[in-house]
């Protein structure tokens, strides 16, 4: 079914809006059909433990979640949820006939030239961009939902579920995308941090810093359009989105450093720290940078086991994963 649906949706006539061409971009959890003006994002029927898209009902629910949550930071980008229908022969996002078999999130196509990663790569990311972004994120974090339930996700024992899960899931990739020595060093350092820095987690809860955040804040998700759109927040698991605000921006700082942007990372943190009123949180910031780098290494490692991805792309994913795990190790040395 999946292969047939992909082939059908790559035909311009199957989409609801006029387009000359359609191309497919895949992640470990999504099929993204990129047309001339719009993008249509379909969830893969996968289960990674931390997310479960294995049923039609779950995929439909999380499409609606993706729409609602992302409108917080990209209202002009996230437009609607559309049904994919099958008429017995072909799959279509345009047709009103046939059984609804999937859903797609319809998004306005953003300019890739205006993505933070693109600006950085061509040397066009300025101090003005960084200050603008710092203000936007600080304002978002200050206004993001906070409840007693969300506060609980800032407890060290609660957050440890995430890091323990990471190590359980990357263990199989030792010798592929990270070495046994790297794995052991990262796990030992993380365990030691929980033992010796408990007060840092407790203090952040008391300061009201545990919020309903973005959860996947890296450079490819920031677009310096007129309204500064920040896309693709985590919709599939609340424990990845309910977090310390420092854990949220740590992802973006780590991503800048992964791409060689240490100066930009330091500048963004300086501006954010000032606007958000952050003080004496650097040890916790490093902890969350390690966590975020391991997450990215894990996500890229997952592509090794994806049957829809070719061998060349799998090799590239392994190289990216190795670099993320090496960065994580650099933070603990």
Image: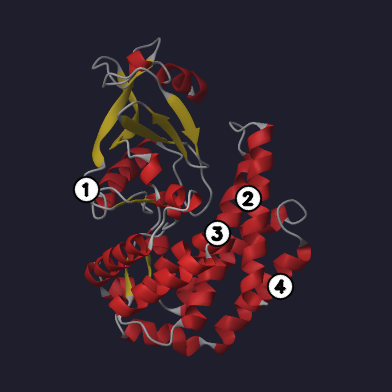
Where does the image place residue 12, in percent across and percent down from the top left? 36, 16
Q: Tag 4 or tag 1, which sits nearer the N-term?
A: 1
Label 4 residue SS: helix
| Residue at mark 1 to residue at mark 3: CA–CA distance | 27 Å
User: Which label belongs to residue 185?
Assistant: 4
In space, the residues marked 4 and 3 are separated at their CA atoms by: 16 Å
Residue on which the image places disc 1: 75
Q: Tell me the quarter of the image containing the C terminus.
A: bottom right
- Helix, strand, or loop for circle 1? loop
- The answer to whether residue 295 is left or right of residue 85 is right
At label 2, counting other C-alpha atoms closer than 10 Å, the crowd grade (few under 14, some 14-19, many 20 or more) is: some
Foreground residue among 31 and 267: 267
* Of pointers 2 and 3, the one earlier in the residue sequence: 3
Q: Which residue is mark 2?
A: 320
Give the residue pinned by disc 3: 295
Image spot of residue 123 (x, y percent) = 47, 53
């Amino acid at each position: 079914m999946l292969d047939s649906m992909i082939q059908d949706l790559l035909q311009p006539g199957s989409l609801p809006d006029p387009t000359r061409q359609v191309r497919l971009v895949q992640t470990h959890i999504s099929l993204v059909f990129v047309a001339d003006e719009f993008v249509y994002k379909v969830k893969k029927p996968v289960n990674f433990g931390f997310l479960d898209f294995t049923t039609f009902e779950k995929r439909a629910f999380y499409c609606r979640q993706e729409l609602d949550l992302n409108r917080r930071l990209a209202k002009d980008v996230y437009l609607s949820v559309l049904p994919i229908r099958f008429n017995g022969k072909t799959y279509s996002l345009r047709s009103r006939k046939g059984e609804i078999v999937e859903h797609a999130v319809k998004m306005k196509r953003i300019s890739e030239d205006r993505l933070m990663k693109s600006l950085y790569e061509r040397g066009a990311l300025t101090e003005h961009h960084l200050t603008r972004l710092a203000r936007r994120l600080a304002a978002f974090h200050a206004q993001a939902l906070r409840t007693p339930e969300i506060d609980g996700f800032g407890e060290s024992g609660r957050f440890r579920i995430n890091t323990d899960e990471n190590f359980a899931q990357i263990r199989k990739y030792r010798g592929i995308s990270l070495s046994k020595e790297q794995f052991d060093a990262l796990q030992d350092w993380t365990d030691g941090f929980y033992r010796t820095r408990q007060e840092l987690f407790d203090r952040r809860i008391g300061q009201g810093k545990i919020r309903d955040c973005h959860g996947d804040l890296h450079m490819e998700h920031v677009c310096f359009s007129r309204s500064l759109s920040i896309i693709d927040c985590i919709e599939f698991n609340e424990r990845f989105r309910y977090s310390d605000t420092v854990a949220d921006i740590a992802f973006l700082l780590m991503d800048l450093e992964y791409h060689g942007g240490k100066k930009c990372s330091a500048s963004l943190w300086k501006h954010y720290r000032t606007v958000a009123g952050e003080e004496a949180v650097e040890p916790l910031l490093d902890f969350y940078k390690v966590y975020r780098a391991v997450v990215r290494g894990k996500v890229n490692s997952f592509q090794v086991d994806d049957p829809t991805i070719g061998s060349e792309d799998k090799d590239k994913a392994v190289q990216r994963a190795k670099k993320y795990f090496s960065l994580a190790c650099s933070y603990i040395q």
